[in-house]
Amino acid sequence: MAYIVPFRERLEREEFPITYEAISPRGANVEGFIQGFRELPCRTQLAGVNITNNPSARVRIDPAMFGHLLMDHVGGPDVLAHITCRDDTLSGIQRWLFGAWALGIRNVVVMTGDHPKEGDYPEERRVDSVNAIELIAGITQHIANGTLIPDVITPQASRYANRFLPPKPPKTVKPVDFFVGSPLIPWRNNEEMYAKAKLEAGAQFFQTQITWDEKPVLDWIERMEKAGHLGRHGKWNVPVLVGACPLKTARTMEFMHNNIPLVKVPPDVQMRLNGAKDFGKESVDAAIEMYGRLRDGHKSRGLTTKLGAHILPINDDALGNAIAEGVAKL
């Protein structure tokens, strides 16, 4: 495998880093997807590529396996593999993490995971042996220091057991130092508290939900910097990569606005796109302009938190690529 500049290095040195969510196959036929990503014009401008983990609880190829294939056959950029709490036990999660590391994966994005009711197996129960905050802490505070993640499940009280006894000593393993990110939704209620808990657990970067409005993002970052949590002079100087996506048709827009939690297309953007001759192209322009306003607002407010872009192509690499290339020119 050719040398690939680590994502954490590009994140640090690039002024406005860009990540991109690759379309992963639903099945084992990967050749066309690998070729499609190899031919993506913006690929060399990306700091990293996200590989999802059964998005919307629909079966897709394992992100560590597919990420390894992309790095091996395409040669970069570095991979950010998603890991969810939804699908596996604590032992299964760690099995996956060690396997991912052995395959060359060095970055993970930790999340709860979409509910099975929207996926291929709606009656399936979530596992959730740990929550996202606990999993971030387990990766950064235990596995990175050479011990397995401790059992966080408190067993039911028993007349024959004293749960106040000291816990068993941790089981040692060879340390693996993943670079750990997490989703962020700045306009969600209590997001300051939730993000702070993730930062205390060890989160090292954020990628936000899709937006077409930079103001809630800037407002949230400004509050976090004033509280001493984020920014160059804050307790945690971590980057925030702001999510955006193209909208190919009015139907796509309506679906996302009405069905994706905490994703809302502002009325002025809806009106603009509905009145456009080319719906998809206009959505690309709207996203690029949002990133321009984001950078201008960041500068005018004197914020010091590093910003970047996170592009989700929504099954349309042509439009997703157009956003990424436009952002790279800003």
Image: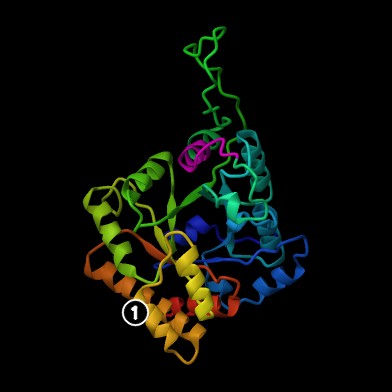
Give the left or right position of residue 231, taking residue 238 as reference. Answer: left
Q: Nearer the viewer, residue 213 or 181?
A: 213
Question: Measured along the vertical axis of the image, is residue 57 above or below residue 149?
Answer: below
Taking the spot 62% from the left edge, 65% from the top edge, the residue there is: 76
Can see residue 122? yes
Corner quadrant of residue 300: bottom left
Quadrant showing the C terminus: bottom left
20 within the magenta span: no
Quadrant showing the N terminus: bottom right
Q: Residues within 10 Å of mark 1 (few under 14, many from 20)?
A: few
Q: Which residues are magenta?
A: 127-139
Can see residue 330? no
Q: Please provide percent x and percent y for residue 294.
A: 33, 71
Q: Please provide percent x and percent y for residue 195.
A: 37, 48
| Residue placed under numbered mark 1 in the picture | 268
Corner quadrant of residue 222: bottom left
Principal secondary structure, stretch drawn in magenta: helix
128 within the magenta span: yes
Q: Nearer the viewer, residue 106 or 138?
A: 138
Farthest top residue in view: 160
Give the left or right position of residue 91, taking residue 21 as reference. Answer: right
Q: Give the image's coloring scheme.
A: rainbow
Q: Amino acid at mark 1?
A: Asp
Farthest front residue in view: 123
Q: Please provide percent x and percent y for residue 193.
A: 33, 45
| Secondary element type, mark 1 | helix
